[in-house]
Image (cartoon, rainbow, N blue to C red):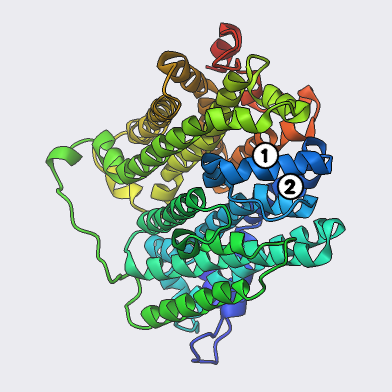
Amino acid sequence: MTAFALRVRPGSSRQLAGTGTLLRFALRRDRLMIPVWIAVNALMVLSMPGTLGGLYGTPAERADLIRQMETNSSLRAMVGPVFGDSLGALTAWRAGVYAGALAAVMSLLVVVRHTRDEEESGRQELVASGMVGRRASLTAALLAAAVANGVLALLLTAGLTGQGTTGALALGLGIAGVGMVFATMAAIVAQLTESARLARGLTAAVLGAAFVLRAAGDSATDDGSSVLTWVSPLGWLENLRPYADERWWVLALLAGAVLVQGAVAYGLAGRRDLGMSFLPTRPGPATGRLGSAGALAWRLQRGSVLGWSIGFLLAGVVYGGMTEGTADLVGDNDNARRIFERMGGRSGLTDAFLASMVGMLGLVAALYIVASVLRLHGEETSGRAEPVLANAVGRLRWAAGHLVIAFGGAALIMLLAGLGLAVGYGKETGPILGACMVQLPAIWVIGGVAVLLHGVLPRGAAAAWGVAGTVLLIGWVGPALDVPQAVLDVSPFGHLPKLPGGSMEWGPVVVLN
């Protein structure tokens, strides 16, 4: 890192000196993470026209879909209202909100990693010792996020041009705009907090609130006109209406939010010392509850566990409440029924839908366990693990504290997801809870891969995100694209029994464990 700092060219004392060098360095560090996020997002969106064309191939089927969505508030809360009957409009309806949310997550991770993470680890201090401008690091981080969102927008626009160039451009710019809104928001939070973990958590909480506000607004109205919808950046993306008489002026809202938040972030960055924050972390006790490595791990990760737990509980309630409405929506559509059967088994449609939702929650839980396991890597690279290990704490005992939180936390959030599904659905509590817990072996396999990569290839531990992203892509898009079973079997989730409704098969569960 010292060598890198010395390569920054001196000579200019301007605020942005060295930005280009820092940007290249950021893109090099994220050469794996950013492409994975872009690929997962782009493939999810670009697969939709073919999938939806098979599901709703006739004007009558599309008209029936629109009528169902107008009367089904629970489904509108999940995916938003439909504004047109073309394949492009249906693609924007089905994938737009989720693609925007994924772009937001990618952006906040990039910005926090190259701002607060760098300060927390001490690397930013070495870089700043060269001739680097005061705001160069923040600018490089935002530019890295802009590059990632720009590439995503280009891929989406090019891939959806066959459905209409204007709509493809609107959808691509809208999704990238949402990503940049949360990139600049993360830049603000990174100035306010002293911890990268807290910066990521707070920005993700804002994203969750934006999704909830949009869902509440869409459940109340069928045209996206609710005040709650307009409060959310995800609601702005929805009301851009790609492929349905585009409202180009909505892009001005996204651009305005990016400019205002960016200006606030730059203002804050110029008014604090390196490593400091406007909201200092409250000092905690040095004894008592922190008397063991496990207690310290819990103290460090309890906020993350709480956030994921609340999210999974609420998601379970929402998906459970949608179960009956989904059965009405699918109706006699054989193609939609086959997709649910591939995801959730060949039992009744209600059980198949519940099983598919359980499987999706399991896939998302794999992201939690990767993030929790890689906390070990973060503690080491930041230097915080060294003082702990310098005392009478063995390395295995220190690692075990974090791994218990990671693997035990996965069990907790799946249990809460099952409780939420049971509450939302209103029946079959036992089978639903069992179905959620059956997902744990596959989730733990992904966690085990993350542990292996951290131990064998510490510098390449971030590749665990690539593994989790690949599994998520297979489970999310594979059934809709009717990919061969051999491809689905690449994922550990492909070997689990389809519950509730299916028969319990202990063999795969035991092998995965």
Image point (63%, 56%), residue name: 34
Q: Amino acid at mark 1?
A: Leu
Instruction: Evaluate if marks 2 and 1 touch, with contact meaning CB atoms under 8 Å apart.
Output: yes
Q: Nearer the viewer, residue 45 or 332?
A: 332
Q: Is residue 199 above or below residue 385?
A: below
Where does the image place residue 177, in percent across and percent down from the top left? 60, 67
Q: Which residue is mark 2?
A: 43
Q: Is residue 487 above or below residue 309?
A: above
Q: Which residue is mark 1?
A: 473
Number of marks present in the image shown: 2
Where does the image place residue 15, in percent across and percent down from the top left? 48, 87
> How many angstroms separate mark 2 from mark 1 (CA)?
8 Å
Upstream in sequence: badge 2 or badge 1: 2
Image point (80%, 57%), residue name: 160
Residue 451 visible in the current orientation = no
Where does the image place residue 397, in percent across and percent down from the top left? 33, 31
Q: Amino acid at mark 2?
A: Leu
The disc placed on residue 82 is none
Side of 387 where 424 appears, left or right = right
Q: Is residue 164 above or below residue 368?
A: below
Where does the image place residue 466, in percent across and percent down from the top left? 63, 43
